[in-house]
Image (cartoon, rainbow, N blue to C red):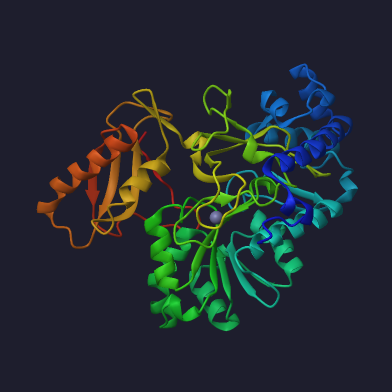
Amino acid sequence: MKSFYLTPALNKMSQEEIRAYQEEKLSRQLRYCYDNSEFYKNKFDDSGAKPEDIRTIDDLRKLPVFMIKDDERKSAQASLQKYGHPFGLHLCANVEDIYLTGTTSGTTGTPTFSYTFTEKDINFIGPQLGHRLSLAGVSKGDRVVFFFALGIYATTMTLWGLRWLGALPIDIDARAGTDLLLKFIDLTKPTYLACTPSLAEFLIDKSPKILKKDVRDFHLKGLLTTGEVGIAIPEIKKELEDAYGCRAYDYWSPCGNAMGISCDSDEYYGLHAVCPDVCTSYEDLIDPITKEPVDIVDGAIGEMIHTSLEREACPAVKYAYGDVVQVFTKECPGCGFKGKRIKLIGRADDMLIVKGVNVYPTAIKDIITSFVPDVTGEIRIVLESPPPRVVPPLKIKIEHGKHIGQADLKGLSKKISDGLHSEIKIRPAIQFVAPNSLPKETRKTPIFEKAY
Ligand SMILES: [Zn+2]
């Protein structure tokens, strides 16, 4: 039988037994957070609960959210003023014991150091990260080119996992540009490429121009994509796999929790929860508006709440990181994995409300992309006032396909509009633009265009 989990005992357990295993770890972790951080002590006291009241994951689900991104920033400012470090009042370890730190905001905004670990933390998390990537076939001797903004989590935490596997990470700062990335690929002959899905798409046209080679000639064993919704969209997965001639995987680990990876299947079956030692994130969802718990039933959609199960430095406890996901509870039809799987739907703060209906931009993009090649798949949602409320109709710019002429646009507009109406109950105002006219970014391609 395939070893989905790193801890051998977990591979022999039922999902109920794994849950009981997590609950044991949970009690210890919550007690530790309460005893070692004023921030968490206050949060527990405000909620009227003590750590020992939280014996099960169901108990945990009833606790209110303890932290959102803005609280993390405030906590970091407060610790900077009080103690002269940016790791926050929720730091539970001695500041001298911090061994590794990283952030997600390498290029924009004020960074928060959500990826802060003691040596014990990284020795625990590294193997989990490595094991997760081993499910995509990465092993000793592989060379993995990493192309992300310097200092984001992927270039700190995840590299630890690769080293644990005996693979060689080749880390290139995204700001060096794609010409240099291609030269590095040509020189180092990697077996895997890790980048955003939109960057992987961008290289398909770029590589023949710079290297006089197709991306297929890289002979990769796999593409490892993260950072945005990509291969969850069937057309994008197929485009990448056809162009590169290998499997495209999707992996994810927001603030070192919720580690997941997609499986080796033609169809996309979501991020598999292969690291239950790390957190309870796949078991704790809330409604992004009402903040009430969402029942974990097959197909349920909600904002994921992170609680770490084994972390010394900056454990997450009821952290609403802002990612909205759809959860799947049935056995994976692709690989037989029995645990939870999730599909990223979008950011809670990207959510729009159109005539009282919650609409996620990725759902719109997903539906529009199903009209490739009549459209290129690039879109922008034009906002005329601050989100989430939108005065209908929602305005969308869509790049039409190369072979589409002016005469075809009316019929195409109706087909897309009908598609959006039947799936997500919106009738947008569609404006077509020429192929390749919407700018693509090497980092995250924006989905909104602000017109206010
Ligand atoms: Zn699977």
Please give the name of the residue rendered at 61% of the width and 69% of the height, measured from the top-left corner: 137
Quarter where residue 79 is shown: top right
Measured as percent of width and height from the top left, residue 296 is found at 57, 33
Please give the name of the residue rendered at 36% of the width and 42% of the height, measured from the top-left corner: 364
Measured as percent of width and height from the top left, residue 74 is found at 70, 32
Count of picture labels: 0
Please give the name of the residue rendered at 51% of the width and 46% of the height, measured from the top-left corner: 343
Side (left or right) of 262 relative to 112:
left
Is any atom of residue 64 visible in this view?
A: no
Q: Quadrant of ligand 1?
A: bottom right
Measured as percent of width and height from the top left, residue 317 is found at 73, 34
Quarter where residue 293 is shown: top right
Side (left or right) of 368 relative to 316:
left
Q: Nearer the viewer, residue 155 or 315?
A: 315
Measured as percent of width and height from the top left, residue 147 is found at 57, 65
Side (left or right) of 175 relative to 315:
left
Q: Nearer the viewer, residue 11 or 371?
A: 11
Quadrant of the drawing holding the C terminus:
top left
For this orientation, the residue located farthest to the left is: 407
Picture layout, residue 111 above or below residue 205: above
Is any atom of residue 129 visible in this view?
A: yes
Quadrant of the drawing holding the N terminus:
bottom right
Please give the name of the residue rendered at 58% of the width and 23% of the height, measured from the top-left corner: 292
